[in-house]
Image: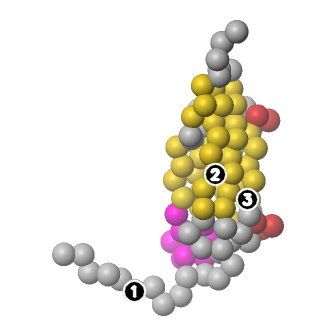
Amino acid sequence: MAETLRLSPAICAYPDDNYENYLIEVVLPGVDKKDISFKLTEDSFYVAASKEGVQYLDSYSTCCPVNPEKAVAKYSNGVLKVTVPYQQPFEKLVDVKIE
């Protein structure tokens, strides 16, 4: 029996251009949508997915509290994209000069 390889998926998480929504992209090559589990709380998320011989899993903290009940997720071409609004949009952002 072959051993299952456990890997952390590639994750990219960032605010949208208006700093109102948190965008999460999870790269899951070759995984069927039915084999993905994505769970979200106001301060973290967990992803688990599997395909033959590989299990992707990990958990992550969000940078700011989000509204998990309003999350929208779509899976296409091996990438899970989740959009979830922040509880409080970023305000008073200050550009920091980079030297």
Name the residue furthest bottom: 92
Amino acid type indicated by mark 1: Val
Q: Position of residue 77 (x, y in %)?
A: 61, 37
- Choose mark 3 or mark 2, whichever is in front: 2
**Structural distance between the alpha carbons of marks 3 and 2:** 10 Å
The residue to which callout 1 is attached is 94
Q: Residue at (75%, 53%) from the top-left corner?
A: 39
Residue 87 in view here: yes
The amino acid pointed to by label 3 is Leu
What is the three-letter code of the residue carrying label 2? Ser
**What whole-number distance in Å separates the C-alpha atoms at marks 2 and 1?**
29 Å
Q: Which mark is residue 59?
A: 2
Whether the magenta-drawn stretch holds residue 18 is answered as: yes
Return the x and y of residue 16 as percentages of the image width and height: 54, 68
Residue density around tag 1, few if under 14, some if 14–19, many if 20 or more, within 10 Å = few
Which dot, 2 or 1, sits closer to the camera? 2
Of the residues under marks 1 and 3, which one precedes in the sequence? Answer: 3
Residue 21 higher or lower than 5, as above or below: below
Say whether disc 3 or disc 2 marks the residue closer to the N-terminus: 3
Reply above or below: 41 against 33.
below
- Residue that numbered label 3 is attached to: 40
First along the sequence among labels 2 and 1: 2
For the record, the magenta segment spans: 14-22
Could one spot residue 30 in this view of the protein?
no
Q: Is residue 70 magenta?
A: no
The percent position of residue 2, horizontal first and vertical second, equals 66, 12
